[in-house]
Image: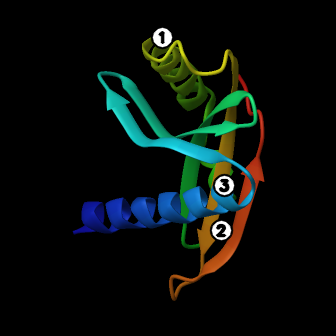
Amino acid sequence: MRDLRKKLLGKRGEDLAAQFLQKNGYKILERNFAKRYAEIDIVAQEKDVLVFVEVKTRTSSDFGNPLEAITFWKLKALTRSCQFYKSLHPELPEALRIDAVSVLLSPSGEVAKIELVKNISV
């Protein structure tokens, strides 16, 4: 039951993040890319930059900002995933960037805060 709630929460957060990104000029190319070890929440393009977006969703900030869940090791794995994705899509822009979106929901499920951090890196 808990896993299902977590999955639904993640899906809602990714939906909200995708809408937020589109409103801010991003073109969504793909969502939930997953192959072998590679997993990317959102692949988008902003102008001439290919952007990989990690989304973190929480229902409270009791354990800190959702972005604090992006650890050094998660970022290293994400970087490898982005390189793999780009190797599969050589026609996409050469310039690459990893962004993060934090989605904080109220207890009733409404958006309390969405935050975009551009160009996170190891």
The picture quadrant where one finds residue 20 is bottom right
Q: Secondary structure at mark 1?
A: helix
Whether the residues at callouts 3 and 1 have beta carbons within 8 Å, the answer is: no
Task: Name the residue: 53% across, 22% down.
Answer: 82
In this view, the residue in front, 122 or 95, is 95
The first of marks 3 and 2 along the sequence is 3
Please give left or right for residue 96 compared with residue 9 in the image: right
74 relative to 65 in the view: left or right: left
Q: Amino acid at mark 3?
A: Leu
Q: Position of residue 111 (x, y in %)?
A: 62, 77
Please tell me which residue is depicted at 56% across the width and 53% down the height of the picture.
56
**What quarter of the picture does the N terminus occupy?**
bottom left
Q: Nearer the viewer, residue 121 or 30?
A: 30
What's the distance in space between the residues labelled 3 and 1, CA to CA? Answer: 24 Å
Name the residue tied to disc 1: 87
The reply to whether discs 1 and 2 touch (Cβ–Cβ < 8 Å) is no
Badge 3 vs badge 2, beta-carbon distance below 8 Å = no
Please tell me whether residue 52 is drawn above or below residue 106 in the rendered image. Answer: above
Question: Which tag is nearer the camera, tag 3 or tag 2?
Answer: 3
Residue 63 at least partly seen: no
Q: Badge 2 local density, few (<14 within 10 Å), some, or many (20+)?
A: few
Can you tell which quarter of the image residue 74 is in? top right
Amino acid beneath label 1: Ser
Residue 40's tag is none
- The residue most toward the left is 1
Q: Which residue is mark 2?
A: 61
User: Residue 75 location, x and y as percent?
Assistant: 60, 28
Q: Is residue 108 visible?
A: yes
Q: Which mark is residue 21?
A: 3
Disc 2 element: loop
Locate residue 37, reporting x and y percent.
35, 22
Front position among marks 1 and 2: 1
